[in-house]
Image: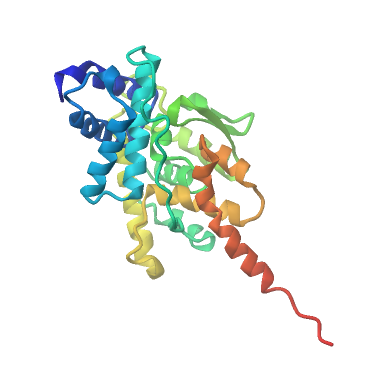
């Protein structure tokens, strides 16, 4: 990293951590910003212009970078300059007039069908079975991400109000109403909670070492369960299932039920922009086809 931008880059890194971005998200943002700053290393931060951003775009294109990767890079650079403005390092954002690439065709999200999802929990066969069943349930039936599960504290579960308080991306809070079955599972999970090493540990999920369960441990639990699930459900053989695909399954199946609208789903998932939630609307086309199949033409 050019010494000219060392302080700004470090400031951005600290800001991402303080605003509860997941380690994976931090890594992606920092990589994109690092690559960009290397390309403008001969300039001062306040002298970077829109033309520099566009030149970076051209460079990425020449290297074979596609639309999705460019959009992610632009989002990273845009956020970097927003943070710089916030801390009075610059006074304008050179990316403000730069448009994202239009994605012509969006692939349908990968998910597990509702009927198959009901079998998922029986494949949790671990030492801390109740804890791990609860973790998988939080993803598949409450739509939580790995980072959100990692951050859950005991106080976030309000049994009386029947809801869970979730800290999502960008330090944004949301509330998830809990059905009775999930409340009972959380109650059992708390009764079997591993004794933490420190008495003041507030984490809802504790590792075998007595600490807040790590993101990598959560992903490891999920990966093992999904692998066993795939062996019993051959239609998913070769399908790249993951913890995020369980969150997809929650969203797709809920929307397919016809009991929620897009705005409600946006709030349940904690999406800041509804365009992020719209990737699940493909299921509406499926629902329309199913509905049309029930129509019987009148015979004359």
Q: Taking 117 as reference, is 205 above or below it?
A: above
Decide if residue 195 is in sight here.
Answer: no
**In this orientation, which residue lies closer to the viewer: 52 or 115?**
52
Can you say which quadrant of the picture contains the N terminus? Answer: top left
The percent coordinates of residue 97 (x first, y second) are 42, 32
Q: Residue at x 63, y 69 (%)?
A: 290
Question: Where residue 252 appears, x then y in whole percent?
Answer: 53, 54
Taking the image as shown, residue 2 lies to the left or right of residue 142, namely left
- Residue at x 37% of width, y 42% of height: 71
**Furthest residue in direction right, as rendered:** 300
Report the front residue among 100 and 152.
100
Q: Is residue 67 left or right of residue 296?
A: left
Q: Report the quarter where the C terminus lies.
A: bottom right
User: In the image, what residue occupies the spot 33% across and 24% down?
Assistant: 17
Q: In the displayed structure, does residue 86 sit left or right of residue 116?
A: left
Above or below 233: residue 125: above
From the viewer's perspective, is residue 287 above or below residue 170? Answer: below
In the displayed orientation, state which residue is furthest to the bottom. Answer: 300
Q: Which residue is outermost to the front?
A: 51
Q: Would residue 219 be seen by someone viewing this image from the given angle?
A: yes
Colour pattern: rainbow
| Residue 31 at x, y percent in the picture | 24, 34
Looking at the image, is 218 positioned above or below residue 14?
A: below
Q: Is residue 6 left or right of residue 192?
A: left
Question: In x, y percent, where is residue 244?
Answer: 40, 47
Residues 129 and 227: in front is 227
Among the 4 quarters of the image, the one containing residue 152: top left
Q: How many marks?
A: 0
Q: 81 or 133, which lies in front?
A: 81
Residue found at x 37% / y 56%: 241
């Amino acid at each position: 990293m050019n010494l000219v931008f060392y302080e700004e880059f470090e400031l951005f890194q600290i800001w991402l951590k303080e605003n509860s971005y997941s380690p994976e998200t931090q890594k992606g943002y920092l990589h994109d910003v690092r690559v960009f700053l290397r390309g403008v290393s001969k300039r001062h931060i306040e002298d970077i212009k829109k033309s520099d951003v566009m030149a970076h775009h051209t460079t990425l294109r020449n290297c074979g970078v596609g639309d999705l990767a460019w959009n992610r890079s632009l989002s990273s650079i845009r956020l970097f300059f927003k943070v710089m403005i916030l801390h009075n390092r610059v006074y304008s954002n050179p990316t403000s007039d730069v448009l994202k690439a239009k994605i012509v065709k969006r692939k349908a999200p990968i998910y597990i069908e509702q009927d198959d999802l009901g079998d998922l929990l029986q494949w949790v066969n671990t030492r801390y079975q109740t804890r791990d069943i609860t973790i998988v349930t939080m993803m598949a039936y409450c739509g939580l991400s790995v980072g959100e599960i990692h951050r859950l504290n005991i106080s976030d579960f309000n049994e009386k109000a029947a809801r869970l308080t979730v800290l999502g991306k960008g330090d944004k809070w949301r509330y998830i109403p809990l059905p009775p079955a999930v409340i009972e599972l959380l109650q059992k999970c708390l009764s079997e909670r591993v004794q933490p090493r420190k008495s003041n540990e507030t984490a809802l999920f504790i590792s075998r070492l007595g600490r807040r369960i790590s993101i990598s441990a959560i992903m490891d639990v999920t990966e093992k369960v999904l692998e066993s699930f795939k062996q019993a459900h051959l239609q998913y053989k070769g399908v790249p299932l993951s913890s995020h695909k369980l969150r997809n399954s929650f969203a797709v199946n809920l929307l397919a039920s016809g009991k929620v609208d897009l705005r409600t789903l946006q709030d349940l998932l904690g999406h800041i922009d509804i365009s992020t939630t719209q990737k699940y609307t493909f299921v509406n086309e499926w629902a329309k086809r199913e509905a049309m199949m029930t129509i019987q033409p009148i015979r004359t």
